[in-house]
Image: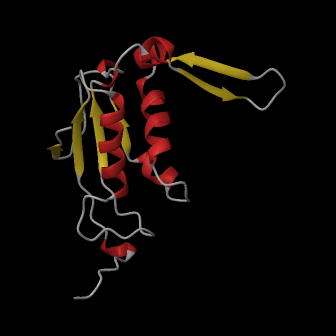
Amino acid sequence: MKTIMLKGSQVSRKYYLIDAAGKPIGRVAVAIAKLLTGKHKVDYTPHIDNGDYVVVKNASKAIMTGKKSEYKVFFWHSGYPGGLKHVYFKNAIINNPRFVFERVVRGMLPKNRLRKKRLRRMIVFKDENVNIPFNLIEYKV
């Protein structure tokens, strides 16, 4: 049996819908990373970006287990002296859930040139209203 090596012109993409309400953010992020990389497909090729689009709804209702929601902090630096900035998870998930999901999923994707392209295919909605004119496939987490 021959090994399947996909070419860039043979890539076909689907749109998956994930409901994050009441689910741990880490479990949702693992499912998103798997769909973005294309590891769920039979013709997975590591050097070709053949992952699918992922639409996340109810992102602001995702949870963290234990007391992590109170203590989890996201840090970044502006590059200037004294430019260390931070935001707590409990504030960030309400105000900007896209930022939280980007940070969590970004750490789960392979660290290579395809990571930025894969992250662009993740669409995050804060609440129930999903306005995508494509045929969405429900993905259970």
Q: Is residue 137 above or below residue 21?
A: below
Q: Quadrant of residue 83?
A: top right
Q: Residue furthest right?
A: 81
* Quarter the N terminus occupies: bottom left
Residue 12: where, in percent of width, then height?
27, 65
* Left or right: 94 as drawn, with respect to 116: left
Residue 11 at x, y = what percent?
Answer: 31, 68
Q: Is residue 17 left or right of residue 69?
A: left
Q: Position of residue 63 (x, y in %)?
A: 33, 20
| Residue name at image x 45 percent, y 35 percent | 104
Residue beneath the point at 23% across and 36% down: 18
Whether residue 78 sits left or right of residue 135 in the image: it is right
Q: Is residue 44 left or right of residue 91?
A: left
Residue sitting at 50 percent across and 42 percent down? 107
Residue 21, compared with residue 3, is above or below; it is above
Residue 82, compared with residue 38, is above or below; it is above
Residue beneath the point at 43% across and 52% down: 118
User: Residue 24 lies in what quarter of the image?
Assistant: top left
Number of dots carrying numbers: 0
* Residue 51 x, y percent position in the rendering: 33, 58
